[in-house]
Amino acid sequence: MAKSSPKPSLQYPTNIASGNNDYFQLQIFAYEPLGLGGGGDNLFDVSSSQAQRPKVDKETSGDNQSYLGQIILPMPDNIGDNNSVSWDTDSLNSLTIAGAGTLSDAISNLNLKNPDPGKALNTLTEGASKFLDALKDVDVRGSLKNALITSAITGGNVDPNSIVSRTTGQVLNPNLELLFKGVILRQFNYSFTLTPRTSEEGTQIKGIINTLKKRMSAKNTAGAAAGIFIKAPDVFQPRFMQGQKPHPFLYSIRQCALVSMNVNYDGAGIYATYGDGTPVKMSLQMSFRELSPLYSEDYKDGLPGPDEGVGF
């Protein structure tokens, strides 16, 4: 079966990808939604893994229908990464914890294959007994009374702790704790200085700017759906390269959306062009955001090898 024609490749400066030079590669793909998942053995397995995204290399790029081409640029002016996750403080008073714990134990004692309501009821009874024992303490009774009265009168618009503190000089223990809240998608901001030395390099830079603008833009739908939907822009796979291999030290990046782009056509501080109108110096800023979050399993066990970078 004959291979399809090679996809377009734009490069600045000329021949930067030859030899063992370091450079920045942007492979372009048509966006492919991952769907809702649930098609395997696990109904709740909704994948956001990078493994589900299309990949390409030099040998197979002509056969990958979602692969649309590549752009090769010099290393950006600022290279750095920032990994973060969301943690935040959370509080839960002891009364709520006790009630939730008792109910959780009762549900855990329910055997759906061989139901024994009596066992679950015993758990609830034990919890109620412990609660009544706690109410023997005058401070507990007073705090609970004020909390319940506040909720009943104000509909929960006033913090019960305000009433408890005013009447007893104490508050319900908030059991304050720092809890994990979720993952955060990384964003990368890169700047490039473009100074064409030949008309060929000027043509390549013009093509690079045009391609980036086109591929980051949303698309109108055709046919019967025209005017009803708009399609997602194409997406990018940024990579730091050394020669024909990934950079042996720098970090890896997941597939990204190009969320913003800025071009300054008078990078020299004054408007100056060559005879064909190509600006003498330009600056290009791009902001990428990863399509999927990172997990611990995305990192290999053990220390990186001599040809492996620092990971994501």
Image: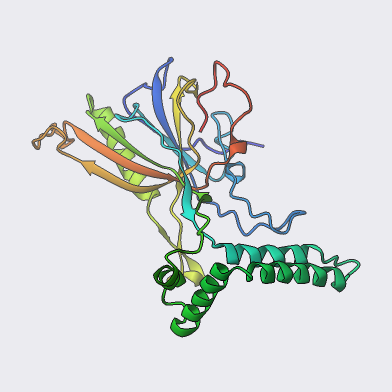
Q: Nearer the viewer, residue 112 or 189?
A: 112
Query: Where residue 239 sits: x, y (%)?
Result: 46, 32
Q: Residue furthest right?
A: 114
Q: If the image is split into quadrants, where does the N terminus sit? A: top right
Residue drawn at x 46%, y 19% is 243
Q: Nearer the viewer, residue 265 or 248?
A: 248
87 left or right of 192 in image: right
248 up-or-down from 265: above or below: above
Residue drawn at x 64%, y 70% is 136
Does residue 8 appear anywhere in the picture? no
Query: Where residue 245 sits: x, y (%)?
Result: 51, 22
Residue drawn at x 33%, y 48% is 260
**Based on the displayed image, in which of its 4 quarters is residue 105 positioned?**
bottom right
Query: Where residue 114 sits: x, y (%)?
Result: 91, 67
Q: Residue furthest bottom?
A: 153
Q: Nearer the viewer, residue 286 or 165?
A: 165
Query: Where residue 36 sits: x, y (%)?
Result: 63, 59
Residue drawn at x 66%, y 57% is 37
289 left or right of 52 in image: left
Count of labels in the image: 0
Does residue 70 appear anywhere in the picture? yes
